Amino acid sequence: MKRTKPLAVVAGAALFTLTACGGSGSNDPSSDRSFTQAPEVGKDSSRQAPAAEVEGAQKGGTITVFLPGDPGPDSLDPTEGWSVTGNSIQQALTSRSLTQYARDPKTGEMTLVPDLAVDLGSANDDFTEWTFTIRDDAKWEDGSPVTPEEIAWGITRSMDSDTFPSGPGTEYSQTYFSGAGEYKGPYTDKGKEWDGVRVEGQDVIIKMSKPFPDMDYWGAFMAMGPVPLGKASNPPDYGKNILSNGPYKVESFRPEEELVLVKNDQWDPNTDPARHQYADKFVFKFNQDQAKVDQIMLSDNTESQTALSTSLGSNNYDRASTELGDRVVQQSSQCTSFLSPDYTKITDINVRKAIAYAYPYTDIWLATGEVPGVTRVPANSIMPPGMAGKHDYFVDGEQFTYNPEKSKELLKEAGHEPGEFKITMVYYEADPLSVAGQKVLTKGFEEAGFSVKAIPVQTSPYNIWLNPDDKINKTLNLRGVNWCSDWPSGLTMVPPLTKGGAAYNTSFFDEESINDEMNKITLLPLDEQADAWGALDEKISTEYFPIIPTAFRNELFVFGSKIGNPVGDGAISAPDYKDLFVMQ
Amino acid sequence: MTAQPAEPEKLGTLAEDDHRPDPQATKKDSITGKSPMRIALGRLAKDKIAVVCAAVVLFFVIIAVFADSIMKIFGVSTETVLPSAYLDTLGGGLPLKGPPNHGFDPEHPFGIAPQTATDNLAFWLKGAQTSLMIAGLATAFAAILGITLGLVAGFLGGVVDKIISFITDLFLTIPFLLAALVIAPIIAQRYALSDNYQDIQLFTLVCVLSAFGWMGVARLIRGEVLSLREREFIQAARVLGMPTHRILIRELLPNLAAPIVVSVSLMLPTFVAAEAGLAFLGIGVTSGTSWGQTIAKATNFFETYPLYLWEPMIGIVALVLSLNLLGDAIRDALDPKTRR
């Protein structure tokens, strides 16, 4: 899942939020907050509805959510949702699917539990056919029951990459489901029959084209949920006017501005093993000004007491953590930032290692408004912390830090004198922070023996990196990517970034043996896969080092003093909307 | 028989002989004879506000011209540094030495910037340079363009006047900010691969500013020319067979000096402010140094590090205010109708 904050994709592979005003007069680094590891995600196939009450939860009230610098989703269509912001809101509040995550109030661990299915589904021996039994008591907001046919229809829709080009189905449905690559979806291939999904009584049976052991995780995406049959769900209109089946329904939605959700009285807690319906109303305010939101949250007035913010300006971090204490919640996200040296142009692994030593990690985080050690920490592997099977290895025997001498040595070994090797990269000029970050990066690289040509671009670097015909892209030999896992499996990290031909493989790394190994891992028994992905991660990095992990990332949330249960959701790195309430 | 013109003698006598033929008085008259420009300068020198403003403007001009030498004297530079050595990583990226939380730091008299740790004084000096250079160039271009078009339109009249007036009106209807927001990124994108990108960006900004700044001058000059071209001296020049360009340059232009000086002196501060405004909005000078850009970064720190915001603010306000007041004073001095 990629991050969608448009201003956030900058300089190499760092991702920034806009900084804001205010702060305290404190002089010393006063906080001892450090990077938290995401706990591993477990599974509980037998979790029953209703969900356990949150301790001290009260009913009523309105929760306002500020999303600084985040435009939110353009469309609420479940099939289209593939962003941290949109999915975290909708999957928690409006749009149910086959499975979902529940947070353990004591440990903070996320557990995969059933949602509209009665369990986590069952697969045949080689994971090529999955069966989900759908519960018969869930209802839409208009009171009609949610039927297995409607879920099958939702799954069928996810095959349509042309209609939903930015949907997650393009990556998963179109890779693993039967007819992948041939069947183009119900809107593009009108009237064509598809054998990928069928309904038998209350059962939805999904056929795969290749083994897909992670179907239960994929089922937690709202794209694997029900959609009304027929014309009612025609895109793009349905995205503006969705039918809700979760605890809340849409009262009004203005893209990039505001989303108001109110209680859905047709939702029955006895049909849902993880969601709650405490607050009367949720108001999401998109594209907020970070400085303004920080001031609102720090003021602790009546407006901000029942509000929460999904980010905090780094210049206010010090003050906020002193004044608000545990109301500032640090949520590790399953995300890694990378630099991607072009594998076809930078062919010597020593040069790639030199780049890793030449990247001034802490300096760039500072210049781009991050809090080093809190919102960004050094990364050692492709898989983020907390992902099952992650190996704690170091490519060069130790953690890469900024070390210009070492970089020069490695360059010399590769036969390049200082200043000879030219790095060509782009930066997003419209954001002053990214310009500042690029300047620092250029300085660091130059001191480490590279020469740098930084090309300013007026659009998101992804638009350059992902467009093979772009004339600027053709000149680059260093790109980047920020990647968040879609579920806690190496499958959603390693192949999308290092498999030959993958869309976000911006380094164009393509080794036959590695590609084969990836295909083999998906055929392994389920309990061996996590380790296999970890081992492959280590193998790719130590033998080829095609992408340079620069940071593991953390989000900072600020909760008002009257928001109950102020915690984050570790599965998607957003506030835990399911369990929030207002203290009266 | 032709009628005699009415009382030609009287006019003659009025001019010369009607008063006492005091030899001393005629002598005094010839001494005090002054050109209009000298009269205006004399008035300007008596205007205290004008003198102070001129001094402030001169101060900034000196700063701009000798920015590099001044930076050397203070031992500062605009060079990028690796900030982690100078900043408090957990304290919002504020400096470890110097303002706002520590005393004066002689190495960096204006302090260093939060987050990037660059020197504020160097950026301030260079910002003055950028600001004045862009404003000066844009004013020069806009004035030349406006004067030329105004002269031609006013003097030739007819179809030429109609076309030029239409273009002027057309440009006046285009909202400047919107156009700048659209044009700047397009040009920047076009030259993104170029090696001297910074210079191109600067030149682009000058072009955008002058392209949307010439209309006022053109209209003003055209109006003046319309009234001047019917005067006898122009008619005479035409009758004598003087070529048009010579009439325009030799006869008309000197008579337009006053309105040109006034409009130019009021155009400068507008462009200084526009440059800073555009940089604040993230277009214009984004890769170099600019006061507007510093302000955009500093607004986030208005509480924690106010000095960082005050420095460029004071620079812009002082420069624009004094340029404006100076322009007003020049206008008053050149206009014989205003007496204070």
Image (cartoon, grey):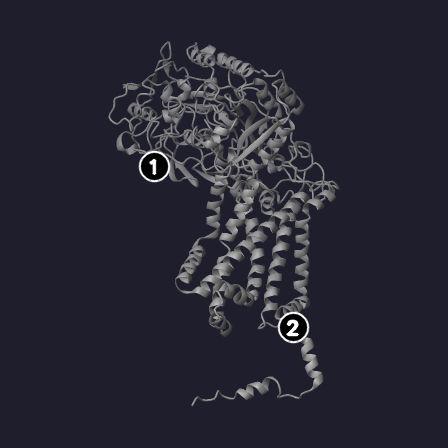
Q: Which residue is mark 1?
A: A241
Camera-near label (2 vs 1) is 2
Q: CA distance from mark 2 to mark 1?
A: 80 Å
Q: Is residue B326 above or below residue A506?
A: below
Q: Is residue A42 above or below residue B123?
A: above
User: Quick one: which residue is furthest to the right in this view?
Assistant: B106
Say left or right for A371 vs A179: right
Q: Nearer the viewer, residue A279 or B196?
A: B196
Chain ID, mark 2: B
Q: Which residue is mark 2?
A: B34
* In front of the other: A35 or B288: B288
Q: Could you tell me residue A503's position as x and y percent?
A: 43, 24
Residue B211 drawn at (x, y percent): 49, 52
Q: Residue at x 63, y 44 (%)?
A: B303
Q: Which residue does the image show at 44% across and 41% down from the upper left?
A: A257
Amino acid identity at mark 1: Asn
- Identify the mark at residue A278; answer none if there is no mark: none
Residue A168 image-quadrant placement: top left
Q: Is residue B91 among what the camera can see?
A: yes
Q: Is residue A120 above or below residue A472?
A: above
Residue A374 located left or right of residue A480: right
Q: Nearer the viewer, residue B190 or A532?
A: B190
Element on which disc 2 rests: loop
Q: Is residue A34 left or right of residue A282?
A: right
